Image (cartoon, rainbow, N blue to C red):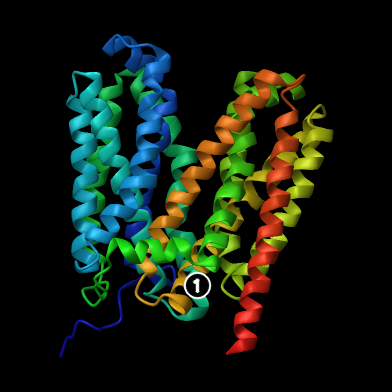
Amino acid sequence: MKTDIALPEQWLGMPTAIWALAASVFAIGTTEVVMIGLLSSIAEDLSTSIASTGWLVTSYAVGVAVGGPLVAALTNRMHRKKLLFAIMLLFVAGNGLAALATTFGLLLFCRVVSGVAHGVFVGIGANVASGMVSREKRATAISIVFTGLTVAMVTGVPLGTYIGQRVGWRFTFGSIAIVGLFCLVANQRWLPTYIKRGRAIEFTDQLRVLRHKSMMLAFALTALSFTALFGTFTYLSPLLEMQAGFTEDQITLILLLYGVAVALGNLMGGKLANYQPARVIANLLALLVVTFCLMFLLLPYKIPALAVVAGMGFLGFAIVPGIQLYVIELSEKYLPGTEDVASVLNISAFNVGIAAGSIGGGILISTSPGIASITMMSALFSAVAFGVAVMSRKQENKFTKII
């Protein structure tokens, strides 16, 4: 007799549903960063300035950081499978409408909608994935979901940019919407029906999460880590060109190398963080501090430069699954029933870090003697993140001793 709690279908040792979630996150990750390669085309087509068109990037981040947690709280009564289906449908609608947009205002609205879908789906999807496997495989499951983002950086963004430049930016968003439809069908087919719905969460519960010292340390850890990473990554192309003397064609290949390192780091970090994620995060951040310092010294030398760039990608994204799992575990321990909202808030923290790193790097480049100084900024933020990781571990050790 079949029941709703039958073991889920497996593929490569993991529930097929987790791979369906990863495919969805790939589509979401592509639409997040492909805009960077389409700004000039959109500005020309809609008769806006590049500076104004940049709000299409900012509005998406606002949708993720602000809209995601709000919608997650409002929809926490919904069954998780139905919620993920509805959010993916919202994502498809946002990109489909963007493909048809004839005004800048409408396109801006579509970006906010897509950002909200990003914040909710990635946060809740990671939590759902961690609940479909045994405890010792939770970080691995989360890392597979986040692999969708890394694959988007490696393949989705270059392909989406190529389509936009050759055929038109509308085709890029239309293509993403079509991929989203396939992912929607995959989620409906493979996500199990026994996923529990969340406890009804009020906005006061979100405030409780944000006021909790351990949770805030974890969110700060996330934001600081990605401030460090994106302070350098955002400007990696001009950094390699000006410091190491690489050509544009060579930099394209280096970015592929970086993407491979990111994917490997994400998967390896998931395996390492299955046990004691806080300890693994602290160790990886210590190595990241060393990597950024070496980058400052070795960028003028091509072969060493390749090594430190790969190291940055590997270590920077090896941290991601551990941080996400750590936030989920902390919410389970201190504020049971708020795991989904905590997970979504952490996705917001990632985006706060991305924005802060990009802005900080830009300011430093415009006011400092050399572009290489951004690597030292990244080293500094990595060191601060390491300090926060140590503080967080001490906080948890005190809690463990008390109980």
Q: Position of residue 53 (x, y in %)?
A: 37, 19
Q: Position of residue 335 (x, y in %)?
A: 42, 75
At 56% from the left and 32% from the top, the residue drawn is 358
Residue 296, quarter of the rendered image: top right
Amino acid type of the residue tagged 1 in the rendering: Leu
The answer to whether residue 85 is above or below residue 368 is below
Residue 19 visible to an observer of this rendering: no
Residue 96 visible to an observer of this rendering: yes
- Say which residue label 1 marks: 330
Dot 1 lies on which element?
Answer: helix
Towards the viewer: 250 or 32: 32
Q: Position of residue 124 (x, y in %)?
A: 34, 61
At 60% from the left and 61% from the top, the residue drawn is 268
The answer to whether residue 297 is above or below residue 78 is above
What is the count of numbered marks? Answer: 1
Q: Position of residue 382 (x, y in %)?
A: 69, 49
At 15% from the left and 90% from the top, the residue drawn is 1
Q: Residues within 10 Å of mark 1 (few under 14, many from 20)?
A: some
Residue 371, quarter of the rendered image: top right
User: Quick one: which residue is furthest to the left in this view?
Assistant: 1
Towards the viewer: 118 or 272: 118
Query: Where, quadrant-wise, is the C terminus in this rendering?
Result: bottom right
131 displayed left or right of 3 = right
At 69% from the left and 62% from the top, the residue drawn is 282
Towards the viewer: 117 or 183: 117
